[in-house]
Image (spheres, helix red, strand yellow):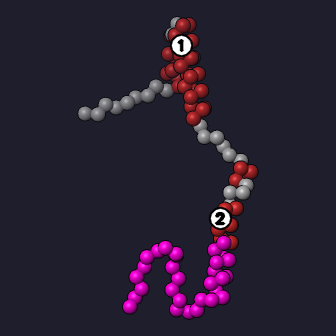
Amino acid sequence: MQTKRTYLSYDDYAKGIQTLTSEDQLKLLELISANLRKSLKSRKTKHSIMELEGLGAAIREDREKARKTLGKLRKTATVGDVLSPIGEEWEAAE
């Protein structure tokens, strides 16, 4: 049988704090402070759009390299030529 979890509301906590001793209230405050510090540290840092500057450069360089390679192949390739990456094994239809 599963037990149903019940959660206290903010108002329930606020009313309960008033019944605590000063020492227990300080302990609770320290606990809340530690939990808050921990959760704030674990939040992801928001990034600026300026941090993305230059990240697409590698993609552009690869694209330009591929265009140059295709340009060289256009000069010598003819319709029907089979092109494959160097070092790749493949079976040609007989």
Viewed as shown, does residue 37 lie left or right of 12?
right
Determine whether the residue tagged by mark 1 lies in a helix, strand or loop. helix
Q: Position of residue 81 (x, y in %)?
A: 53, 89
Q: Nearer the viewer, residue 87 or 31?
A: 87
Total numbered circles = 2
Q: CA distance from mark 2 to mark 1?
A: 55 Å
Residue 28 vertical placement versus 1 (above, below): above
Main structural element of the magenta stretch: helix, strand or loop? loop
Can residue 86 be spotted in the picture? yes
Whichever of labels 2 and 1 marks the residue nearer the N terminus, that label is: 1
Q: Position of residue 68 (x, y in %)?
A: 68, 77
Q: Residue at x 43, y 76 (%)?
A: 89
Residue with the mark numbered 2: 59
Q: Nearer the viewer, residue 9 or 88?
A: 88
Specify start and end residues of the magenta stretch as a single range: 65-94
Q: Residue at x 66, y 72 (%)?
A: 65
